[in-house]
Amino acid sequence: MTDVFGQTSDVVVRFAGGDNAGHLIKFNEKKYKVTIVPSGIFNPKTINVIGNGCVVNLENLVKEFNTVKDSGEKIGKLLISNRAQLILPYHSVIDAAQEEARGDAKIGTTKRGVGPAYQDKAARLGLRVGDIPLSNFKDKLKSNVDYQNKFLDKMFGKPPLDFEEIYKNLMNAYEEIKDHVVDCGLFLESAIKEGKNVLFEGAQGALLDIDHGTYPFVTSSNCSANNVSIGTGISSK
């Protein structure tokens, strides 16, 4: 339904989740699957925002956005919060290793690294989109990769990931989206004050909410409407 409502919205905002939940959009008799790009993308008048409550795999985002751009359709603008957390390659490896270790108690993760990215956010180990252009980002990423490689080795016997490859691929992806990065809260507060029609888009239903869903068979974020203000930076009033 969000793609239907998105056609009449000035702004569509994803406020939680990652690229683990696909949305099927039907437009001009064609079907398009998006996982992280907001569902208003096929309205050229709509600004689509990935909020700070989301976790983002930049390489996957670039591929998906390029697919949308290459569709031949007129599309809307895409913006990304500078506070959105990054999903990095070690998150996906950890996700798969943890699921495998659960044996018969698997929770059904998509192995996209969403859960481990939210784990790092809560543990204050995560890196954000807005960290990438900072002078100390490479050092912070190197520290994280070293830490996670030790974790993967000691806990699961997994081989180390290559830092230079991770850094190169991440920087290449960032080059393609850096002009789309904004302060999400400030942008949305301004849009609301201007009387814009803003649609907030979740990724999953309420029963997958980490606090109010069928725990532990839930997602790793708060996906109910109560999380809109937290996941976007707008006032709750």
Image (cartoon, rainbow, N blue to C red):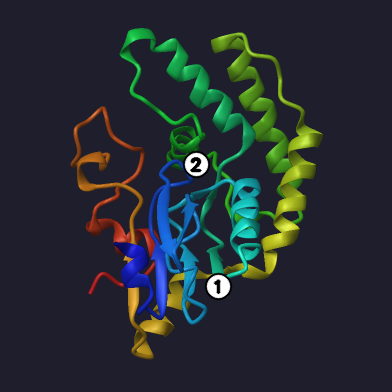
Q: CA distance from mark 2 to mark 1?
A: 36 Å
Residue 21 horizontal side relative to residue 97, left or right: left
Q: Quadrant of residue 147?
A: top right
Q: Quadrant of residue 201?
A: bottom left
Residue 162 location in percent, x, y? 77, 28
User: Would you place residue 43 above or below residue 158 in this image?
Assistant: below
Residue 113 seen = yes
Q: Sort mark 2 into few (<14), some (14-19) or many (20+) by Cα contacts within 10 Å.
A: few
Q: Which residue is mark 2?
A: 124
Dot 2 lies on which element?
loop
Dot 1 lies on which element?
loop
**Residue at left offset 43%, top offset 34%:** 115
Kind of residue at disc 2: Arg
User: Would you place residue 145 above or below residue 55 in this image?
Assistant: above
Q: Quadrant of residue 130?
A: bottom right
Residue most extreme to the front: 29
**Residue at left offset 51%, top offset 34%:** 113
Q: Which residue is mark 1?
A: 75
Residue 96 location in percent, x, y? 51, 22
Residue 136 seen = no
- Looking at the image, is mark 2 or mark 1 nearer the viewer? 1
Q: Quadrant of the N terminus?
A: bottom left
Residue 221 location in percent, x, y? 34, 44
Identify the disc placed on residue 54: none
Kind of residue at disc 1: Ile
Residue 116 location in percent, x, y? 48, 32
Q: Sort mark 1 into few (<14), some (14-19) or many (20+) by Cα contacts within 10 Å.
A: some
Residue most extreme to the bottom: 194
User: Would you place residue 7 above or below residue 169 in this image?
Assistant: below
Seen from the viewer's position, the closer of residues 188 and 19 is 19
**First reached walking from the N terminus: tag 2 or tag 1:** 1
**Residue at left offset 49%, top offset 26%:** 95
